[in-house]
């Protein structure tokens, strides 16, 4: 582990996994297009999916030396968001952000066998065990129905990339359906790649045409604080009620997971049990944990007899 991210030196090759800055002399793997996984600048060969490349471009980062294939490197669907991949090379599996649950158009990740596993553990505590998706759907549909009966419009909050598209598929049957302009832009790119998402008007156009005053309605918007000027405006003008979706809502210890009027634990990551299952299915002899509860999850794996340790700077030097 380096200050620039995970660096693997194997078979006389330098492989940088989700680097902050692209390494000009190595292979740079970008697992997906969430901002915390995109490099800040170019400078070398970038291995990633075509979807990640285009989403990154939409978000302001153009990959100058993008490739989709290198011999002996396998990009495997990680189930996190559109275009997200894990990377298998030299018997090492790097998960990137991963989810093994099917969620609308997103199919759960497949887990290949490997000797060394480098896995995220965003929700690597036993308290993070998520409800079944069908239960979340039932609860949210009932809540929307109750709010509609009162004539109240509803804003569904989820990350602009990933969660917002899942929410659109799960609850797009309600209408009239509107989108925050940024979500509409991201949905349009998903539609370009064949993802079936119901169309709707962006919020700016809807306001200009005085459509939001005709209540109730539903809108999909990015996750944001109740102090955000957009939400404050929607609440004061139209009496909108917010429903937020975040894996952090599963725990009472993390208030930021419940920033909306109502919150539900819906995540694009594995929960604790699913993370353990990923490790077991991989058959890895050695596991390294990154991103999240790295110490706690590694300790749990050791307790069940799996060699594991959290990645720290330079902790990879001894084995690759």
Image (tube, grey):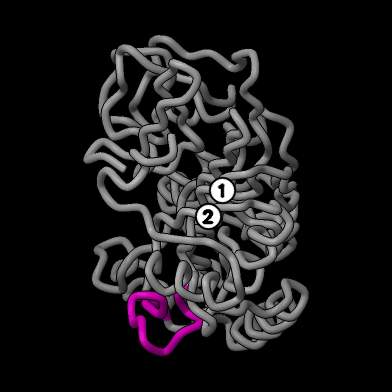
- Whole-percent x and y of residue 310? 38, 59
For numbered disc 2, what is the local secondary structure?
strand
- 151 vs 246, nearest the viewer: 246
Q: Earlier in the sequence, mark 2 or mark 1?
A: 1
Q: Say which quarter of the image contains residue 41.
A: top left
Q: Say which quarter of the image contains residue 94.
A: top right
Residue drawn at (29%, 71%) of the image:
232
Task: Please tell me the numbered disc located at residue 117.
Answer: 1
Task: Please tell me the numbered disc located at residue 287.
Answer: 2
- 99 vs 284, nearest the viewer: 284
Give the class, few, some or many, for how many residues have Cα within 10 Å of label 1's Cα (few <14, many ≥20): many
Residue 132 visible? The answer is yes
Report how far apart the C-alphas of labels 2 and 1 lie in the structure: 5 Å
Total numbered labels placed on residues in the image:
2
Q: Is residue 259 left or right of residue 249?
A: left
- Whole-percent x and y of residue 143? 63, 84
Q: Is residue 82 left or right of residue 59?
A: right
| Above or below: residue 193 compared with residue 169 | above
Residue drawn at (74%, 47%) of the image:
110
- Give yes or no for contact between labels 2 and 1 (Cβ–Cβ under 8 Å): yes
Residue drawn at (58%, 34%) of the image:
87
- Whole-percent x and y of residue 315? 32, 47
| Above or below: residue 137 compared with residue 1 | below
Q: Say which quarter of the image contains residue 248.
A: bottom left
| Residue 250 in magenta stretch | yes
Residue situated furthest front in the rendering = 318
| Residue 147 in magenta stretch | no
Tell me the magenta residue range: 248-260
Dividing the image into 4 quarters, which one contains the C terminus? top left
Residue 213 visible? The answer is no
């Amino acid at each position: 582990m380096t200050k620039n991210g995970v660096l693997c030196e194997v078979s006389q090759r330098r492989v940088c996994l989700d680097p902050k800055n692209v390494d000009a002399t190595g292979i740079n793997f970008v697992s997906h297009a969430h901002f915390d996984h995109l490099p800040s600048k170019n400078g070398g060969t970038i291995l990633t999916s075509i979807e990640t490349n285009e989403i990154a471009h939409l978000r302001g980062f153009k990959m100058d030396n993008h490739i989709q294939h290198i011999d002996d490197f396998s990009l495997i669907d990680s189930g996190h968001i559109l275009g997200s991949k894990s990377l298998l090379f030299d018997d090492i599996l790097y998960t990137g952000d991963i989810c093994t649950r099917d969620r609308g158009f997103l199919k759960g990740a497949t887990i290949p066998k490997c000797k060394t596993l480098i896995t995220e553990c965003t929700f690597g505590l036993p308290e993070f065990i998520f409800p079944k998706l069908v239960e979340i759907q039932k609860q949210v549909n009932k809540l929307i129905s109750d709010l509609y009966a009162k004539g109240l419009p509803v804003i569904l909050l989820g990350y602009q990339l990933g969660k917002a598209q899942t929410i659109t598929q799960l609850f797009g049957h309600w209408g009239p359906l509107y989108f925050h302009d940024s979500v509409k832009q991201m949905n349009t790119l998903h539609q370009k790649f064949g993802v079936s998402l119901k169309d709707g008007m962006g919020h700016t156009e809807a306001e200009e045409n005085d459509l939001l005053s005709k209540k109730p309605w539903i809108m999909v918007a990015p996750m944001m604080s109740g102090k955000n000027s957009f939400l404050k405006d929607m609440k004061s003008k139209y009496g909108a009620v917010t429903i937020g979706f975040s894996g952090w809502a599963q725990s009472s210890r993390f208030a930021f997971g419940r920033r909306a009027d109502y919150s539900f634990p819906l995540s694009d990551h594995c929960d604790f049990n699913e993370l353990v299952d990923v490790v077991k299915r991989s058959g890895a002899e050695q596991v390294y944990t990154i991103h999240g509860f790295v110490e706690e999850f590694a300790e749990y794996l050791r307790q069940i007899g799996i060699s594991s340790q959290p990645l720290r700077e330079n902790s990879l030097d001894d084995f690759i």
